Amino acid sequence: TGFLGLFGRRVDSIDYYKQKIEDLDKK
């Protein structure tokens, strides 16, 4: 679960920042 856990978290973070960037772009 260590590696997959870190990878999963990293993917979640990327998606989170992607959404934030998209929100900034809309403004």
Image: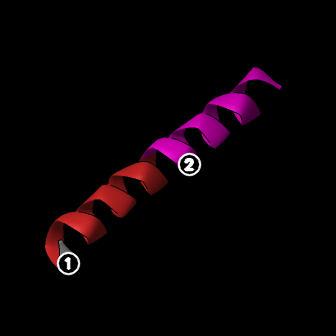
Q: CA distance from mark 2 to mark 1?
A: 23 Å
Q: In this view of the protein, which residue sits in the foreground, 4 or 24?
A: 4
**Secondary structure under badge 1?**
helix
Q: Is residue 12 above or below residue 25?
A: below
Q: Is residue 5 above or below residue 12?
A: below
Q: Amino acid at mark 2?
A: Tyr
**Residue mark closest to the camera, 2 vs 1:** 1
Q: Which residues are magenta?
A: 15-27
**Secondary structure under badge 2?**
helix
Residue found 56% across the figure and 48% down from its top? 17
Q: Which residue is mark 1?
A: 2
Location of residue 23 in the rendering, given as x and y in whole percent from the top left corner: 72, 31
Residue found 25% across the figure and 62% down from its top? 7
Location of residue 20 in the rendering, given as x and y in whole percent from the top left corner: 66, 41
Disc 2 crowd rating (10 Å Cα; few below 14, some 14-19, many 20+) is few
Residue 4: name its quadrant. Answer: bottom left
Where residue 17 is drawn, which disc sits there? 2
Q: In this view of the protein, which residue sits in the foreground, 26 or 12?
A: 12
| Relative to 1, 22 lies left or right | right
Q: Is residue 16 magenta?
A: yes
